[in-house]
Image (cartoon, rainbow, N blue to C red):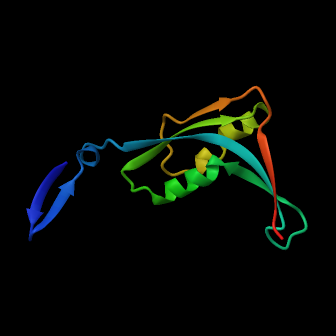
Amino acid sequence: MNESVKNGVKEGVNDSVKNGVKKRVGVIGTFVWDVIHGRDKRAVAVEEWGGITYSLSGLDAALADDWEIVPLIKVGADLAQRARVLPLAQAHRSGCGAHRSAATQQSRRIALSRR
């Protein structure tokens, strides 16, 4: 980090940003398929990705522009094809090293009910 002092305050320019290289953070987890009953007034359940996707979304929103996320994700064989498209495509900071591993068993599914 290059630092200078201006009016008694340290100012820094990160070398990685200056050189166009992003910092990387790895995240390990599993995609889960959620079925949520009673989330809103609709009679039908809402189905969507869960598990690590919540952490990835929060991290994507919280990280500065000089960071990228490199997720290492396990998904069941039944949803592996679907997971190749979503949800990493929605993450703004998903790095080129993202890896999805298809397990031989079925994906975990969670049913949530709101009362």
Left or right of 103 on screen, residue 44: right
Against 35, residue 7 (above or below) is below
Instruction: Kindly identify the residue that appears in the image at 64 percent across and 30 percent down.
Output: 101
Most distant residue in the front direction: 115
Give the x, y percent position of residue 68: 44, 46
Pick the quarter of the image with the C terminus.
bottom right
All told, the count of numbered labels is: 0
Q: Residue furthest right?
A: 43
Q: Is residue 83 left or right of residue 56?
A: right
Residue found at x 61% / y 41% = 29
- Residue 110 at x, y percent in the picture: 79, 50
**Residue projecting furthest to the bottom:** 41
Residue 104, x across and y down, in percent: 76, 26
Looking at the image, residue 3 sits to the left or right of residue 16; the answer is: left
Q: Residue at x 49, y 34 (%)?
A: 97
> Where, by quadrant of the figure, is residue 21 drawn?
top left
**In the displayed structure image, the side of residue 60 where residue 34 appears, left or right:** right
Quadrant for residue 45, please give it: bottom right
Return the x and y of residue 69 as percentages of the image width and height. 48, 45
Q: Which residue appears at 50% of the width and 54% of the height?
A: 59
When the figure is inspected, residue 58 is found, relative to residue 88, above or below; the finding is below
